[in-house]
Image (cartoon, helix red, strand yellow):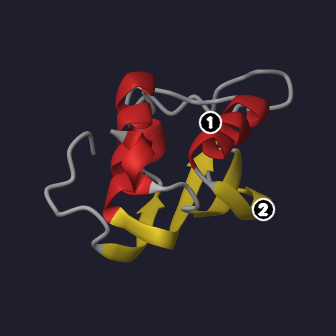
Amino acid sequence: MKSIPVEDNSFDNVICLEGFEHISREIGRTFLTEVKRVLRRDGLLIMTCPVLSEKGETTGNPYHLCEYSEAEFIDLMNLHFRIEQLNRFQGPDGSEYKIVGKNFKDQRYLK
């Protein structure tokens, strides 16, 4: 997830379901930069990700390397994408978000 081996502006959509929480914060930020790079302008990132409970508790899933608070997750997504849709739902391990983010920034400024 830290290196997507395709050319810039290659995809209209990138889908990441139940993967973001399995990587470190550092690799997560790199992944979002890579997604922006490979998405065409106005392309969409469609992603689901568990978040901490309102009390700040993790899901307890031992395979999750990083779980974000609701605010931290939304702030991180806003840094990279314009949020088109954001839905909170109850997943198998706790609260999760489904997000659809639009790639709106000029790719030239990412390098």
Tell me the residue at 62%/45% (across/down): 77
Q: Farthest residue in the left direction?
A: 5
Q: SS of the residue at dot 2?
A: strand
Q: Is residue 17 left or right of residue 38?
A: right
Residue 81: image location, x then y, percent: 60, 53
Q: Which residue is mark 2?
A: 87
Most foreground residue, 82 or 107: 107
The residue pinned by badge 1 equals 76
From the viewer's perspective, tell me whether residue 34 is left or right of residue 65.
Answer: left
Three-letter residue code for mark 2? Asn
Choose the circle earlier in sequence order: 1 or 2.
1
* Residue 104: % across, % down: 58, 61
Quarter of the rendering containing residue 2: top left
Density class for disc 2 (Cα within 10 Å; few <14, some 14-19, many ≥20) is few
Kind of residue at badge 1: Leu
Count of all numbered marks drawn on residues in the image: 2
Q: Residue furthest bottom?
A: 12
Query: Marks 1 and 2, how far apart in space?
Result: 16 Å
Q: Is residue 61 left or right of residue 30?
A: right
Tell me: 19 left or right of 84. left
Q: Residue furthest right?
A: 54
Which of label 1 and label 2 is nearer to you?
1
Q: Nearer the viewer, residue 104 or 67?
A: 104
